[in-house]
Image (cartoon, helix red, strand yellow):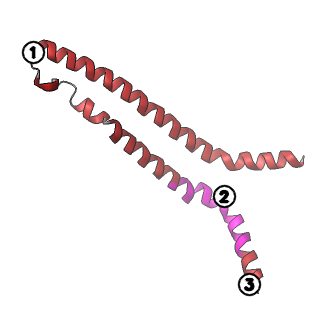
Amino acid sequence: MYSLKILGEIARDIIMFPFWWYSRGFFQVLKGLINFLKYREKGLALRVWVKNFWKPMYGQHDWQGRLISIFMRLVQIIFRSLFMLFWLIVCTALVVCWVLFPPLIVYEIFFQFV
């Protein structure tokens, strides 16, 4: 009696797996990656650097202090943006892998039988 119920649940899970993978599972992965990117942006403090771009560092209001501040902030913004771009590319690649993984597995299984 229980064995039929267990087999039925296993069959249902196998049938429902692709629907979960491309609906709820996909949105959970997407939400997790978006949160990851938000935390990376906070960790890099990119908005803070952009927001304070024209403000002099260390209270140096003379033209040399402002010039050095602008140059240093520009360098920081460029490198931090490159790091953020790297993480964005990694997350995009993970989403593409998530979408392409099941068809690739089915193709490989079919290829092994042929």
Who comes first in sequence, dot 3 or dot 1? 3
Please name the residue that numbered disc 3 is placed on. Answer: 2
Give SS at disc 2.
helix
- What x and y, as percent, mark residue 94? 56, 42
Give SS at disc 3.
helix
Q: Nearer the viewer, mark 1 or mark 2?
A: 1
The residue at 26%/17% (across/down) is 71
Q: CA distance from mark 3 to mark 1?
A: 82 Å
Please identify the dominant SS of the magenta region.
helix
- What x and y, as percent, mark residue 105? 74, 48
Who comes first in sequence, dot 1 or dot 2? 2
The residue at 32%/25% (across/down) is 76
Left or right of 85? Residue 75 is left
Q: Which residues are magenta?
A: 9-28
- What x and y, as percent, mark residue 77? 32, 26
Q: Name the disc covering residue 18, or none.
A: 2
